[in-house]
Image (cartoon, rainbow, N blue to C red):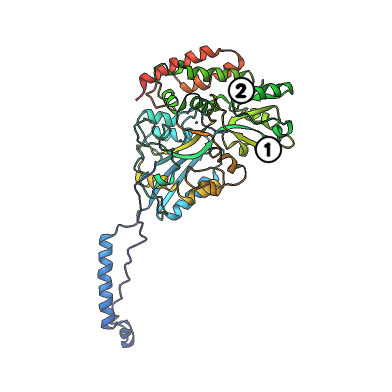
Amino acid sequence: MKLKKVISALLISTMTVSLLAGCGGKTDTPAADNSGDASKTEETKEPEAEKEAESESTDADSETESEAEPVEEQTLKVAAFEGGYGADMWSEVVAAFEASHPGVTVELTIDKKIEDVISPSMKAGDYPDVVHLATGREAALTETLTKEKALLPLTDVLDMTVPGEDVKVKDKIVPGFLDTLATNPYGDGVTYYAPMFYSPCGLFYNAGLLKEKGWDVPTTWDEMWELGDKAKEEGIALFTYPTTGYFDAFTYAVLSSAGGSDFFNSCMTYEDGIWESDNATKVFELIGKLAEYTEGTTVANANNENFTKNQQLILDNKAIFCPNGTWLPGEMADAPRADGFEWGFMAIPAVNDGGSGCSFCWFEQIWIPAAAQNQDMAKEFIAYMYSDEAAQIFAKSTAIQPITGVSDYLEGDNKMFYSIYDNGASAVMGGFAATAPVEGVSMADTLFGTVNSIVSGDKTVADWQASVEEVSDKLRAAME
């Protein structure tokens, strides 16, 4: 499961750390032992030419010693979230970083609930130097530090040379990833989160089922409803979802498709009245109608304990589409499936006639606490994350870095997933602007979490829309 959802996302000026192993001093020639015999005394004597050369060497070494800094052993504290990609890749990347940076020891802490592990020590003033933890998780640690202005600006990292390469970080990252609220949370052009593992999000389905039934892959919502009616006749639901948290990527894509990038950005920055607009109404009503096509057991299992039961529905041909990210096939790799099952993946259909489908690109983030003790080496570590060496290690666990040429490391289904934008889908990136904390107010809970109540019929679409506008008003006043 993509464990983000409310808390789920750096780089620059080349840091070439010159770590010298020593200062090339020589061993002094022992003095002649006058108490020994003559032959031994003669053996310890050196020709004058050798003495002169050695004297020059000694002077040079003395200058080197006075000018060169001694080797500085450094310990870099790295805390990383253990998501669906596993922990082994982090251990391997850390080992490679240490090998390329003599004198640096990385103290790696990795956990599925990394917030619970590092928060107590942070409260006591002991901060990691680097933290890999996306926004959108329930504990909201990344968002909390952002609101408290407790993160280190990373814009200078973008101008750093990728360690071991001759290219700057900013030139290595796929265009578009650095111009979003998901990296520049204050909307001021300053990067505080460096983009990490990215995943095109869309609708997963059993391509084998559609082939078997002779059903076409829908490209518009009218075609979606037609397919839903056909499937219903055969006892198959059109739609399911793991948890309501997955409606973030889904909703972002629909918003962008409905009104374009300017409308999307207005929603993300809480523009007055934006959630009551015609374009917003299209989105709320579309999701409301989709609720009518949602498999009946979905709401009961839409939680962190049972979400895989909802994902299993598409493997069992009990539902056709499920919104998710590219980690889904790996997460369900050992799950049983219907005969002829074949992964299919598509963008969210276009909302408007003649429009293009949209795929929200979700990515994780890595950042440096402003209170980190080893900030320079922390920036070096982040820059290293965009090296070919690191990217290839991550790719073995299907954790894909947003760097140019990354498709060269991919094969099989991953090539299909990461070609979604090549096939005409529009990419959508970003998220809600950071605000000061507002007690009892959560856009994620109100906009996404309410979906369960819409599907169950406990809340109307109109009431839902009004609630979102109300929350937007409160957050707009707190936006910084």
The reply to whether callout 2 and callout 1 are in contact (CB within 8 Å) is no
> Which amino acid type is marked by label 1?
Glu
Q: Secondary structure at mark 2?
A: helix
Tell me if residue 363 comes above or below residue 159 in the rendering. Answer: above
x, y (%) of residue 476?
38, 20
Q: Residue 184: which quarter of the image?
A: top left
Viewer-side residue, 122 vs 466: 466
**Quadrant containing the N terminus in the rendered view:** top right
The residue carrying mark 1 is 342
- Neighbourhood count class around disc 2 (C-alpha, 10 Å): few under 14, some 14–19, many 20 upward: some
Label ID, residue 60: none
Viewer-side residue, 359 vs 469: 359
Q: Is residue 12 left or right of residue 57?
A: right
The residue carrying mark 2 is 222
> Which amino acid type is marked by label 2?
Asp
x, y (%) of residue 194?
42, 39
